Amino acid sequence: MSNPAYYTEEGLKKLLDELNHMRTVERPHISQQIADARDKGDLSENAEYHAAKEEQGLLEARIAKLEAVVASARVIDTSQVDTSRVYIHSRVMVRHVDNNSQREFIIVAESEADVRSGKISVTSPIGKGLLGKARGEVAEVVTPAGTTRFEIIEISR
């Protein structure tokens, strides 16, 4: 079994909905495409059939990967998140030490990350750099653009 991934109830529901869609909509659709292509005759020279079979293989691989993720998923009760340090599902207000700008991040599982809404992955450089830090500490984050320093201003749920 792989390491558990921690999700909010909303994040896990999104994964389950995606898995259900693949199983109930995409899988039958591809099966129908294969059947239609098979009805057209000689399979050795049937490009539609081969394309549909390839698409089916890719879909089955995505389903298997998502099933593995869901099997190892653990739901975190965000009301129980400790706010003395930065953990997964913490809401963190930081101050960029070099330019004094402030930014808020929510540390989430990789599949829940959405940079535009401030949700960053626990496995991202910033997420890794902030993890375990307490209010007032400075996190040095190594990114492709260089090293950035963030002071932890506030940690909340």
Image: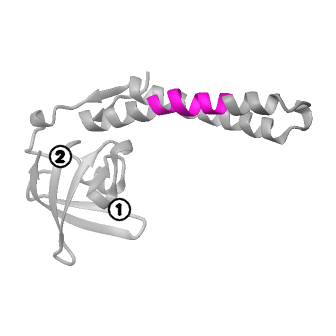
Classify the position of the N terminus by image quarter.
Answer: top left
Write down the quadrant of residue 26 in the picture: top right
Secondary structure at numbered mark 2: loop
**Foreground of the two, 33 or 51:** 33
Classify the position of the C terminus by image quarter.
Answer: top left
The residue that mark 2 highlights is 90
Q: Where is residue 116 in the image (x, y as percent from the top left)?
A: 31, 61
Which amino acid type is shown beneath numbered disc 2?
Answer: Ser
Query: Residue visible at 25% across and 48% down?
Result: 107
Magenta span contains residue 123: no
Q: How is the image coloured?
A: one colour
Q: Position of residue 113 (x, y in %)?
A: 34, 49
Secondary structure at numbered mark 1: strand
Query: Residue visible at 22% across and 56% down?
Result: 105
Instruction: Name the front one of labels 2 and 1.
Output: 2
Task: Kindly tell me whether residue 60 is visible in this rendering.
Answer: no
Left or right: 79 in relation to 116? left
Write down the quadrant of residue 92 in the picture: bottom left
**Foreground of the two, 137 or 127:** 127
Alpha-carbon neighbours of circle 2 within 10 Å: few (<14), some, or many (≥20)? Answer: many
The residue that mark 1 highlights is 142
Asked if residue 4 is positioned above or below residue 107 in the image, the reply reads above
Say whether disc 2 or disc 1 marks the residue closer to the N-terminus.
Answer: 2
Which amino acid type is shown beneath numbered disc 1?
Answer: Val
Q: Give the range drawn in magenta.
A: 20-31
Query: Residue visible at 31% across and 46% down?
Result: 122
